[in-house]
Image (cartoon, helix red, strand yellow):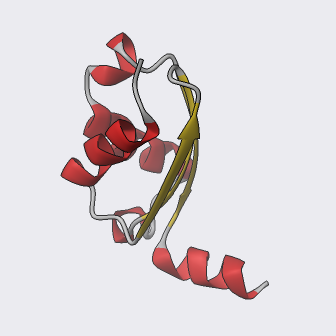
Amino acid sequence: MLSTETIEGYIREKLDCTYLAVKGDGTHFEAVIVSPSFSGKSRVQRHKIVYGALGERMREEIHALSMRTLSPDEWAADAAS
């Protein structure tokens, strides 16, 4: 079983995150990921970036990953509301 810290480490290795929080039970995970890499990208493009960071782990180790992906500007606007 994977820990949330392990998933966070995999994401941070490949993606510049200004905020990252992962919750989960070892196979099913939820993540909030804030990265400048997401600026100007669609939700599908953002998820592909995260899947790319996780690589083969998405097929072999992680059964499900629900993501909320935001740019830093979106994150700031969300916090202000």
In this view of the protein, which residue sits in the foreground, 53 or 9?
9
Q: In which quadrant of the rendered view does residue 7 lie?
A: top left
Left or right of residue 71: residue 17: left
Residue drawn at the location 51% of the way across and 43% of the way down: 44
| Location of residue 55 with respect to 60 vertically, above or below | below
Q: Position of residue 80 (x, y in %)?
A: 72, 88
Left or right of residue 74: residue 38: left
Residue drawn at the location 38% of the way across and 43% of the way down: 5
Q: Position of residue 66 (x, y in %)?
A: 60, 36
| Location of residue 74 with respect to 69 vertically, above or below | below
Q: Position of residue 20 (x, y in %)?
A: 45, 59
Residue drawn at the location 20% of the way across and 50% of the way down: 13
Q: In which quadrant of the rendered view does residue 6 lie?
A: top left
Residue drawn at the location 56% of the way across and 33% of the way down: 29
| Location of residue 7 with respect to 19 vertically, above or below | above
Farthest left residue in view: 13
